[in-house]
Image (cartoon, rainbow, N blue to C red):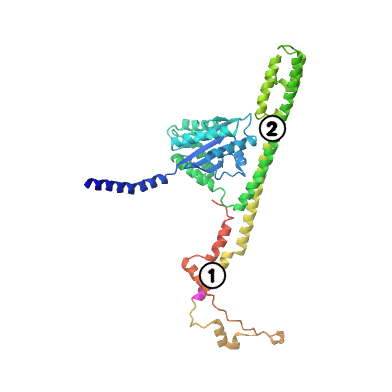
């Protein structure tokens, strides 16, 4: 019987402890940070396994992400979308194939899992992407330089931490590198996430949607032009292939077996493909055509002229984005200045305070004290002295009609009393909120 009671007591204690242990585990948020560097450079912020932020690190990334919606996407899906967009806009290309991936978290297991997922998603999104699981060389060099200057202070500094701290300081210059260095990785990521979320404060949802749609139109236009370039490259390559195949069949018909190409045949081949063909025999020509077929199955590389055209399209898109940003900024500033002037001119707060205080004073008037009208009746005609009779028109009736008796507005008096008790002007709160929206956010 005693043993049964002991077992029952232990079970009860365990049942009571489990909820408290669960609460402690749930309170600890796990943050992770991913930097994807192609130029553009984009960062992902992950909280408890869920994507909570996708932010631009440089100007090209701002263009890449503008007008895009990442809500509800997983880390894998967001990565695929970013890499695909970079390729569509010509950032990721045959001359710029490296995709540097940096991942950091307090939990090493989480860091490993997220890193593998991002790497796989990058490879799935692009056939030409070459994944490098380390930070960009320039970031690594910056960290090495800091560690050389002060080995003790920067001993545990990693490239990922350096990226996070640098971005935080760009968003809040009041902080210092040294104080941020003392924070845990998860705390740094959480701080970065909160600072990024404040950037869009002060804009209405309608304005955000307008900006988003405008930027998306600019990007779609650039993507269309770049896509046309690659279509033209493919068409040119197909035409070259067709000419080479026709030449190969012609040469093959005149030779029973493999032989060296004549000077005339080599000259004709170079007219079609330029200096790219380096073979000397019929079999070399056949191998070149087969290689050309394989390349046609992939994304055709652009010619030097087409690459210049692609870079020009990207620069035009950048300029269009700068103009659009300036236009939206000017519109916002003009609107803010207009309402600031309007607010100061009408001075609604002073008007209300005057009106409000007057009503308060009326509430404090002694009922036994004679009113102004009663005083006028007592004084009679002595209080009304008319000017000279010569200047008075007797046809004009100067007597005023009696005003209807005003009924006290209990609701207003009630509100006034409440305002007085609460120490604030409730009537002004919506007006203040409205104008505070236009004031710059700190």
User: Label for residue 30?
Assistant: none
Q: Is residue 283 above or below residue 117?
A: above
Q: Which of 435/354 is in front?
A: 435
- Is residue 279 in view from this perspective? no
Element marked by disc 2: helix
Residue at the extreme left? 2
Between circles 2 and 1, the one closer to the viewer is 2
Within 10 angstroms of label 1, few (less than 14), some, or many (20 or more) residues? Answer: many
Residue 343 location, x and y as percent?
60, 61
- Is residue 228 in view from this perspective? yes
Q: How many marks?
A: 2
Residue 157 location, x and y as percent?
46, 34
Residue at the extreme front? 1
Element marked by disc 1: helix
Query: Which residue lies at the image location 60% right of the left edge and 61% below the top edge?
Result: 344
Query: Which residue lies at the image location 63% right of the left edge and 48% below the top edge?
Result: 211
Look at the image and say whether residue 180 sits in the magenta stretch. no
Residue 259, quarter of the rendered image: top right
Instruction: Kindly report the secondary structure that dominates the magenta region of the rendered protein.
Output: helix
Look at the image and say whether residue 361 sits in the magenta stretch. yes
Q: Which of 392/183 is in front?
A: 183
Q: Is residue 335 above or below residue 174?
A: below
Query: Which residue lies at the image location 51% right of the left edge and 74% below the top edge?
Result: 361
Q: Which residues are magenta?
A: 355-363
User: Label for residue 356?
Assistant: 1
Cβ atoms at labels 2 and 1 below 8 Å apart = no
User: Label for residue 230?
Assistant: 2
| Whole-number angstrom distance, CA of label 2 to CA of label 1 | 71 Å
Q: Is residue 388 left or right of residue 414?
A: right
Q: Earlier in the sequence, mark 2 or mark 1?
A: 2
């Amino acid at each position: 019987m005693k043993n049964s009671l002991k077992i029952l007591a232990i079970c009860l204690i365990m049942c009571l402890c489990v909820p408290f242990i669960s609460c402690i585990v749930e309170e600890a948020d796990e943050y992770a940070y991913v930097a994807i560097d192609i130029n553009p450079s984009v960062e992902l912020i992950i909280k408890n396994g869920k994507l909570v932020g996708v932010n631009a690190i440089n100007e090209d990334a701002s263009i890449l992400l503008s007008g895009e919606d990442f809500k509800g996407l997983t880390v894998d899906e967001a990565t695929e979308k970013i890499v695909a967009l970079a390729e569509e806009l010509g950032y990721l290309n045959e001359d710029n194939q490296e995709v540097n991936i940096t991942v950091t978290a307090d939990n090493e297991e989480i860091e490993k899992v997220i890193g593998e997922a991002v790497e796989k998603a990058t490879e799935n999104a692009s056939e030409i992407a070459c994944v490098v699981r380390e930070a960009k060389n320039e970031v690594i060099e910056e960290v090495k330089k800091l560690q050389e200057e002060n080995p003790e202070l920067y001993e545990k500094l990693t490239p990922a931490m350096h990226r996070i701290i640098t971005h935080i300081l760009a968003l809040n210059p009041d902080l210092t590198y040294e104080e941020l260095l003392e924070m845990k990785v998860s705390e740094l990521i959480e701080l970065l996430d909160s600072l990024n979320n404040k950037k869009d404060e002060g804009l209405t949802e309608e304005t955000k949607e307008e900006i988003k749609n405008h930027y998306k139109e600019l990007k779609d236009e650039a993507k269309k032009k770049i896509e046309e370039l690659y279509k033209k490259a493919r068409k040119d390559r197909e035409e070259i292939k067709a000419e080479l195949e026709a030449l190969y069949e012609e040469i093959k018909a005149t030779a029973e077996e493999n032989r060296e190409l004549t000077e005339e045949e080599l000259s004709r081949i170079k007219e079609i493909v330029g200096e790219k063909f380096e073979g000397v025999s019929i079999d070399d020509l056949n191998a070149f055509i087969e290689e050309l077929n394989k390349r046609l199955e992939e994304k055709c590389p652009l010619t030097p002229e087409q690459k210049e055209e692609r870079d020009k399209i990207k620069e035009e898109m950048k300029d269009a984005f700068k103009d659009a940003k300036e236009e939206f900024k000017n519109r916002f500033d003009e609107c803010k200045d207009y309402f600031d002037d309007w607010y100061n001119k009408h001075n609604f707060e002073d008007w209300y305070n005057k009106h409000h205080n007057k009503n308060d004073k009326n509430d404090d008037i002694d009922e036994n004290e004679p009113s102004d009208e009663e005083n006028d009746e007592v004084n009679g005609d002595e209080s009304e002295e008319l000017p000279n009779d010569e200047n008075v028109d007797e046809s004009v009736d100067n007597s005023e009609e009696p005003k209807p008796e005003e009924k006290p507005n209990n609701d207003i008096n009630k509100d006034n009393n409440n305002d007085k008790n609460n120490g604030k002007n409730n009537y002004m709160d919506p007006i203040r909120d409205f104008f505070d929206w236009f004031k710059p956010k700190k």
